[in-house]
Image: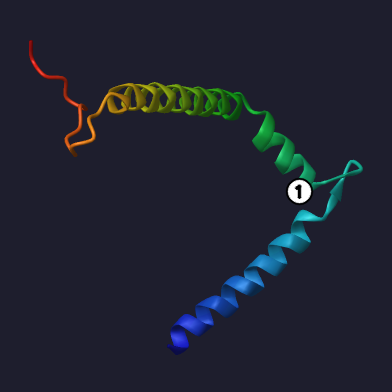
Amino acid sequence: MISEFMYVIKMGIFTVIMVFLMQIQVNSKSIESYTYTFITDTTNTLKLNQVARGIIHATNEGYKMITQKVKELTNGSSTSGSSNIVPASK
């Protein structure tokens, strides 16, 4: 328990020191702003952003198609309790 508490204290001190160091000004900009610009404007980040947007779009379209299909299949269900999710063979 003491070692866990010491870990939390050490990480808190480390965080405060890191925040102070990131505020150092270099050429009228802080190291924090240089780091933020580097992280957000790199080619890999932009590509990952596009991939994530594509996955979100595909997920939304898939969800719409599935819910539409389920609604189509369940609208014709009988009132006797059985469902028409699986169509009967002809």
Q: Is residue 33 above or below residue 65?
A: below
Q: Position of residue 41 (x, y in %)?
A: 68, 29
Q: In which quadrant of the rendered view does residue 66 lie?
A: top left
Q: Looking at the image, which residue is at 41% across and 28% down?
A: 63
Residue under the image location 78 percent in, 47 percent down? 31
- Residue that lies at the very extreme toward the right in this rendered image: 28
The residue indicated by pointer 1 is 32
Residue at image position (57%, 28%) is 49
- Residue 2, position as x, y percentages in the image: 46, 89
Q: Nearer the viewer, residue 82 or 79?
A: 79
Name the residue rendered at 20%, 27% in the picture. 84
Where is residue 13, by image quadrant? bottom right
Compared to 18, does 54 lie above or below? Answer: above
Front residue of 80/51: it is: 80
74 with respect to 30 (left or right): left
Report the quarter where the C terminus lies: top left
Front residue (pair 74, 57): 74
Q: Residue furthest bottom?
A: 2
Measured as percent of width and height from the top left, residue 75 is found at 32, 26
User: Compared with residue 15, is residue 47 higher up or lower down, i.e. above or below?
Assistant: above
Instruction: Characterize the local packing of mark 1: few (<14), some (14-19) or many (20 or more) Cα atoms within 10 angstroms.
Output: some
Q: Secondary structure at mark 1?
A: helix
Q: Is residue 32 left or right of residue 78?
A: right
Residue 70: % across, % down:
32, 27
Name the residue at the left extreme: 90
Please name the amino acid that badge 1 sits on.
Glu
